[in-house]
Amino acid sequence: MKFTTFLAAAACVVALPAVAQDNADWPASITIGTGSQGGTYFGYGSGFGAMISEELGVNAGVEITGGPVQNVTLVETGEHQLGFVTLGPADEARRGESPLMPGTPHENVRALFPMYQTPLQAAVLASSDIESFQDLQGKRVGVGPAGGTSATYWSRFFENAEGYENVKLSFAGGSDTAGQLKDGLIDAFVYAAGLPTGAYAQLAVENDVRFLSMDAETLATMKEIVPAMADFTIPADTYDDQPDPLQTVSLWNFAIAHKDMPESLAYEITALAMENHDRMMTNHAAARETLPENVVKNTVVPFHPGAVRWFEENGFDVPTVD
């Protein structure tokens, strides 16, 4: 009887989840670098942070940041333990081309799991005379917070594409930029965030809005200036006042961590995101693309060993990144 009881107890110990067995070296809390309020990162991260706190017992705080360019550096330096990035800024930082730490290759950053695609988007008030990207010449254009994906790549476009020499750029968070457009302080609001983007959704509910679709010339120019971009279609009716699909470009987003994050914690965070799709969708609709098969979309940031273990245990090949 005693032996049977011992076996049952031993079986219970073996059956305990990894989170209960191997968390002695876990931090009591972590900080997640997201983006500005009104952007997808903030909503996505707030929900995921709550999941980490509830399910893993690690207090996960969400911090508003300038977006991917800042997030990758905050994780590199260890100031943040977890962050969200688009692969363009992450790749550039890995090669030592971060505007925040120029000349310093970011070698401590590791990928955890795929999030979703970030399309470039553009909107004006319906009363505006702006009907195409070419009409932005000489206009005041809000591009999102300085250091974010939006400001980084829209600024690069306007600085390098022909015909936009006199565009005047404005930098602010997504919600603030939408408010500036509504108040007439800027003429156009261009952004980069997962769908649907909260700042655009609210703007379109409260105002008559025109969303701009990229023509073939604009698409080709953007992909020439930023080779990491890929063609993307924003489905019709993603927002009010948007009855037709919009042609644009996008970048993939991944969650990243510092290489010194305990392997078991990186494993559990990856498992939490990959095994709870319905819950992730309640955090933000963009999480519909937070699927394990999309792990192949990252070929520029090395994966954390804990993340690699989860994907391989579940039958997914992880790209090898030098």
Image (tube, rainbow, N blue to C red):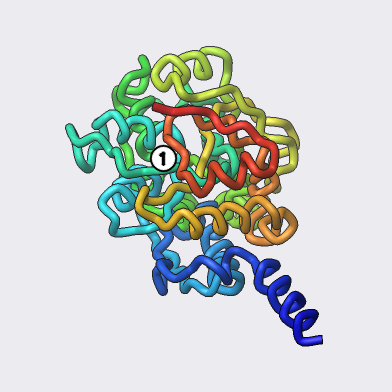
For the image, the number of numbered tags is 1
* Point 58% across, 18% down: residue: 215
Q: Nearer the viewer, residue 272 or 277?
A: 272
Residue 17's quadrant in the figure?
bottom right
- Quadrant including the C terminus: top left
Q: Say if 13 sits above or below 214 in the image.
A: below
* Point 47% across, 73% down: residue: 59
Q: Say if 303 sits above or below 275 in the image.
A: above
> Helix, strand or loop at disc 1?
helix
- The percent coordinates of residue 2 (x first, y second) are 76, 86
- Quadrant including the N terminus: bottom right
Q: Is residue 50 visible?
A: no
In the image: residue 208, left or right of residue 108:
right
- The percent coordinates of residue 120 (x first, y second) are 52, 34
Residue 164's quadrant in the figure?
top left
Q: Nearer the viewer, residue 143 or 31?
A: 31
Q: Residues within 10 Å of mark 1 (few under 14, many from 20)?
A: many
* Point 39% across, 18% down: residue: 225
Type of residue at label 1?
Answer: Thr
Residue reaching furthest to the left: 103
Q: Say if 297 sits above or below 56 in the image.
A: above
- The percent coordinates of residue 315 (x first, y second) are 69, 37
Q: Is residue 162 visible?
A: yes
Q: Nearer the viewer, residue 78 or 133?
A: 78
Q: Which residue is mark 1?
A: 149
Residue reaching furthest to the bottom: 2
Q: Nearer the viewer, residue 303 or 91?
A: 303
- The percent coordinates of residue 49 (x first, y second) are 52, 65
* Point 54% across, 38% down: residue: 118
